[in-house]
Image: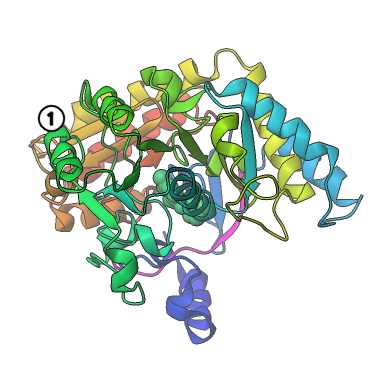
């Protein structure tokens, strides 16, 4: 496939945008080459500026769970736009999507909408600190909770791709309040509690990690975290920016039957428009301004176009009783196909999957935390990525990212992908 126009557009972009992109992983730094510029997308396919058609396994990093340009979402946005695009005043639409989200997700009474997953997580820890009167938080190595200062300590996603453990610009003062633990290691968490008695406001976790590849929680880990939090009057924050409205209607809380104290959302909840949200029981949410002391605000929060898109998306997911089963079955089919062809071609690999989140690691050992995720052979990944791209299959341009499966994928698309992986793995 040719990417002549994309290369030219990237060269133009580099002159006026740092690194030519508005979010680092897009730049293909982890895999080499120049990023592909998208012209349009429909269903499971991307159409780039050179006229190539690609099967999309990223789907805007999650939101396009029902496919690109999903008609009810497009209709909702266009109809709503005619009525005005922003007011900075309340609309009925905000209550409607809030009611629906609260009815779909277990264990929450109120939800506040923001503009990104970063804002959701940032606001959630401020709320947790305000509520508990404590400063410290625990995060897990390799988990990514957006780019706000407290979280840029051994974060996954782009920071792993670029080998940046921490970011300049984050002050020592902020960094010292973020305690770091190993994913799936409860003893490590308990030791941190022991060393910081009555100081930890919250544990924040991706209940299924998706920013160091896909890493499921080992059996009992989330239950143990719940227990440790309850024993220490610490809040458990589930960052469900990836898992929310993807693994089940009620996200990871429902899938694993664990109750978090605060839940963060992004991606799917906005149907592809800039939306994040955080939610909890009344007792905690009533701590927020204007009724409580913890301040949090936004000019474009609850934006009518974004709310219309999110509402159309959640309604579609809520009405389709088979959707999460179907996604699980499609992804299981893909997983089995990948396992078969990689084994037949004697490639050393590990595949991790929970529902419609899946990742392929080029190492034979179990991938259970950040350390084991880093064992993957990046040179093999690069060949795999570019080989698939040449076959018209677009996966994330980094070994540390999860693939997000969309319901728009047909079994024919999945078979094509498995055959492409077969061809590419002969060259690895
Ligand atoms: N939390 C998780 C688990 C994420 O995966 C991401 C983004 N990939 C974020 C938070 C941040 O969301 P956003 O990029 O919308 O700020």
Question: How is this picture coloured?
Answer: rainbow
Q: Quadrant of residue 313?
A: top right
Q: Position of residue 337 (x, y in %)?
A: 28, 26
| Residue 248 falls left or right of residue 344 | right
Nearest the viewer among 207 and 398 is 207
Residue 43 appearing in the image: no
Horizontal and vertical percent position of residue 129? 43, 49
Residue 13 at x, y percent in the picture:
52, 79
Residue that appears at 23% across and 27% down: 221
Q: In x, y percent, where is residue 62?
A: 49, 42
Regarding mark 1 in the picture, which secondary structure is present there? Answer: helix
* Quadrant placement of the N terminus: bottom left
Q: Is residue 250 above or below residue 92?
A: above
Q: Residue at x 54, y 19 (%)?
A: 323
Q: Which residue is mark 1?
A: 344
Highlighted range, magenta? 31-42
The reply to whether the magenta stretch includes residue 60 is no
Q: Is 385 displayed left or right of 374 in the figure?
A: right
Q: Is residue 80 visible?
A: yes
Label 1 neighbour load within 10 Å: few <14, some 14-19, many 20+:
few
For residue 37: magenta?
yes
Of residues 25 and 194, the one nearer the viewer is: 194
């Amino acid at each position: 496939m040719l990417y002549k126009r994309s290369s030219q557009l990237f060269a133009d972009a580099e002159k006026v945008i740092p690194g030519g992109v508005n979010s680092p992983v897009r730049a293909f730094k982890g895999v080499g080459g120049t990023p592909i510029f998208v012209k349009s997308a429909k269903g499971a396919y991307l159409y780039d500026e050179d006229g190539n058609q690609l099967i999309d396994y990223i789907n805007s990093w999650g939101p396009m769970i029902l496919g690109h340009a999903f008609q009810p979402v497009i209709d909702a946005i266009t109809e709503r736009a005619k009525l005005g695009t922003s007011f900075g005043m309340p609309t009925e639409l905000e209550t409607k999507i809030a009611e629906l989200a609260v009815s779909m997700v277990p264990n929450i009474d109120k939800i506040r909408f923001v503009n990104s997953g970063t804002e959701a997580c940032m606001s959630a820890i401020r709320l947790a600190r305000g509520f508990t009167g404590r400063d410290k938080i625990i995060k897990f190595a390799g988990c990514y909770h957006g780019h706000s200062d407290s979280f840029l300590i051994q974060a996954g996603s782009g920071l792993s791709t670029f080998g940046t453990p921490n970011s300049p610009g984050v002050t020592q003062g902020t960094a010292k309040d973020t305690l770091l633990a190993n994913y799936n290691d409860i003893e490590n968490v308990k030791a941190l509690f022991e060393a910081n008695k009555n100081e930890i406001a919250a544990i924040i976790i991706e209940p299924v990690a998706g920013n160091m590849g896909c890493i499921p929680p080992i059996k009992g880990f989330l239950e143990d975290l719940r227990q440790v939090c309850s024993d220490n009057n610490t809040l458990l924050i589930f960052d469900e920016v990836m898992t929310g409205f993807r693994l089940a209607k009620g996200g990871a809380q429902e899938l694993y039957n664990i109750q978090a104290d605060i839940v963060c959302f992004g991606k799917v909840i906005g149907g592809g428009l800039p939306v994040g949200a955080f939610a909890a029981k009344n007792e905690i949410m009533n701590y927020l301004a204007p009724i409580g002391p913890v301040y949090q605000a936004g000019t474009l929060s609850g934006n009518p176009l974004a709310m219309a898109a999110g509402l159309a998306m959640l309604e579609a997911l809520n009405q389709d009783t088979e959707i999460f089963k179907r996604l699980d079955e499609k992804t299981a089919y893909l997983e089995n196909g990948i396992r078969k062809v990689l084994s037949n071609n004697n490639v050393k690999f590990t595949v991790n999957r929970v529902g419609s989140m899946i990742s392929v690691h080029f190492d034979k050992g179990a991938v259970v935390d950040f350390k084991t995720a880093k064992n993957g052979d990046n040179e093999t990944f690069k060949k795999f990525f570019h080989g698939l791209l040449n076959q018209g299959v677009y996966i994330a341009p980094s070994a540390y990212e999860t693939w997000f499966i969309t319901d728009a994928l047909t079994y024919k698309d999945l078979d094509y992908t498995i055959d492409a992986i077969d061809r590419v793995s002969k060259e690895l």
